[in-house]
Image (cartoon, rainbow, N blue to C red):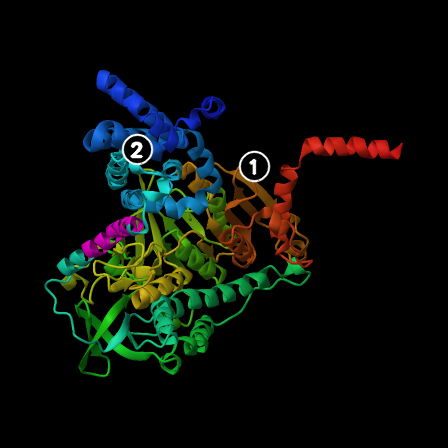
Amino acid sequence: MKKLLILALIASVVILFFASGADQLLTLESIKSSQNRIAEWRDTQPLLVGVGFLLIYVAVTALSLPGAAVMTLAAGAFFGLFWGTVIVSFASTIGATLAFLVARFVLRESVQSKFGDRLKAINEGVAKEGAFYLFTMRLVPLFPFFLINLLMGLTPIRTLTFYWVSQVGMLAGTLVYVNAGTQLAQIDSLSGILSPALLLSFAALGVFPIVAKSVINSVKNQKIYAKWQKPTRFDRNLIVIGGGAAGLVSAYIAAAVKAKVTLIEAHKMGGDCLNYGCVPSKALIKSAKVAQQMREAENYGLESTQPKFSFKRVMARIHEVIAAIEPHDSVERYTRLGVEVLQGYARLVDPWTVEITLNSGGTQRLTARSIVIAAGAQPFVPSIPGLQSVGYLTSDTLWDELAKREEIPKRMLVLGGGPIGCELAQSFARLGSEVSQVEMAERIMAREDAEVSLYAREALERSGVRVLTGHKALRCEKAGEQKFLVAENKGQEIRIEFDVLICAVGRSARLQGYGLEALGIPTDRTVVTNEYLETLYPNIFAAGDVAGPFQFTHTASHQAWYAAVNALFGTFKKFKADYSVIPWTIFIDPEVARVGLSEQDAKLQGVAYEVTRYGIDDLDRAIADSSAEGFVKVLTVPGKDKILGVTIVGTHAGDLLAEFVLAMKHGLGLNKILGTIHTYPTLAEANKYAAGEWKRAHAPQRVLAWLEKYHAWRRG
């Protein structure tokens, strides 16, 4: 109501302004004809006329009425260059600030709620460098000042910042107009004031902040690089440290645009994902799932049977899968693509020089204009007393170590309730091990909604996992050949016996061993970068797990594009890494997949939302496959079909999620998904039915009531 009253008041004043003919008073001809009379008033009542003029000027600019330029000329004619400039400078800034505040109060909330996602980048830019942007626009009178006032009111710039930047930024233009006004009698039109030469001068003045910013950045860079001797020429355009997902994609992009690039990998090409993470774990999950399906064959009208298998053969198959995929990431393939691949340990010597200790012996030094650090991450091992003495495996070491065993460990303890811990716990339990999973938090998969965590826990327990949440690991003990983890739960200590312990409590970025310390590159759990993935040194970038904030292969590849393009072409154009739509999947059975906000996230961030659910137990294909469990949960803007986030629990949830990822990336709502034909019978229909649930909940009941009456009338 207050907003409506303010708008009504402004509209009334504007209508009255034009209806009364006041707009004709603020013309050049009117001011010139009244010059002598107003000069007499000024001479008799200088303070009153000065204050009155200031207030009228404030009102004109605050209401964005035409005539501010003419009044600026009049200020020069009536009050002279000095006082005219003082009056106009303060009056124009006060009026602009009032217009800014009105726009902020009346429009900002509705505009931000409706277009918040599209304005996110603008808001972030203004929050960081709003003063710079505003100052640049104020210097150039070609930008309509009233439009700047209104638009800036929709942004997060502080009112005090807006005021002082406007006062300083408009000063040059004010001086020009006020000075011209001192010769009012000789002015025939407003267009005559801004000659092409003067406009060019203003344009140059507007470019000045950009040039100044560039100079400041150059000075900063000189200070950063001061103690280093920059090479006069470079051996390479780009050097990439690390042959995982981020490193491979960075090197591939460089080679694709014909840059000379060297990729350095100390161990295995393909990094963690191929050798220790995504690939072997999914191969294990598949074997475990088949074993479980054999036990549950009666669900398919078959005879259930206890699977008989060689654990050694299962582990051998995992290594066969790795070997089959290895050529995709091999030295030979990337060499054919135009990448020089060196196998050895890289160390940063200076911001442009990398020394490689080659695996084959000897060292080599290379210089490059830009460097991408893609060193990946490694399993985090907690400092639990006695852990070293009892021995442990990690997601990196278990594949080789367990492959040596003829039989699966009888008792296995998995430490950690995150995605890696849950996947391993369920798989080994399905293969016959007695698995205990210990998690310090009150629930597993704590990043997901509570109902998802509960669903996951029930799925793991059905597979035979003993899930122990709220258990804090205190120490490890040995009694002869027996091994125990002592954990605390609700003040009580319990002893959990195991044969093999797997640490799966997370992964930490690799930050040591390749020269970050020598160069003074800041780290904080990851390598510290800006939005362009630049480190302290603008020519050194970081991407993938070593840079965070996500530890997914697909985000590492995503970041690699930004790192490589900014490294090679950043002189001309830089791109900010976009994390607006990041999907992920936890490959337990049933799978858990998510993109965007969960309910838990939305509540923590104070984001308003609606929830639409569709139960997969109602889906024809899921029923036919005897996998009728799980759900699709979509968060939308209240009253709208715009998607804020999606969580899917069910068979092939990670595959089903792709449709929602595409929709969110390109701003498509649930109505578009509902209007898309989905093959029957497929699991993908769950997405369409979820959209249908939203449509049903938002059906126009009043219109439907009228339609009911219409059809009744048609029946006679």
Q: Earlier in the sequence, mark 1 or mark 2?
A: 2
| Number of residues whose C-alpha sits closer than 10 Å to that of mark 1, classed few (under 14), some (14–19) or many (20 or more) | few
Query: Which residues are the magenta region?
Result: 198-217
- Alpha carbons under labels 1 and 2: distance apart: 48 Å
Residue sitting nearer the eye, 345 or 591: 345
- The residue singled out by tag 1 in the image is 639
Which residue type carries mark 1?
A: Gly
Residue sitting nearer the eye, 158 or 550: 158
Q: Element under label 2?
A: helix
Q: Residue at x 36, y 52 (%)?
A: 416
| Number of residues whose C-alpha sits closer than 10 Å to that of mark 2, classed few (under 14), some (14–19) or many (20 or more) | many
Q: Element under label 1?
A: loop
- Would you place residue 393 above or below residue 310 in this image? above
Q: Quadrant of residue 506?
A: bottom left
Q: Residue at x 46, y 26 (%)?
A: 14
Q: Residue at x 30, y 33 (%)?
A: 72
- Would you place residue 258 above or below residue 604 in this image? below
Q: Which residue in the rendered view is the most extreme toward the right?
A: 716
- Would you place residue 487 above or below residue 395 in this image? above
Majority SS type along the magenta span:
helix
Which residue type carries mark 2?
A: Thr
Task: List x then y, in percent, for residue 341.
Answer: 31, 79
Q: Is residue 417 magenta?
A: no
Q: Which residue in the rendered view is the most extreme toward the left?
A: 227
Q: Quadrant of residue 108?
A: top left
- The residue singled out by tag 2 in the image is 72
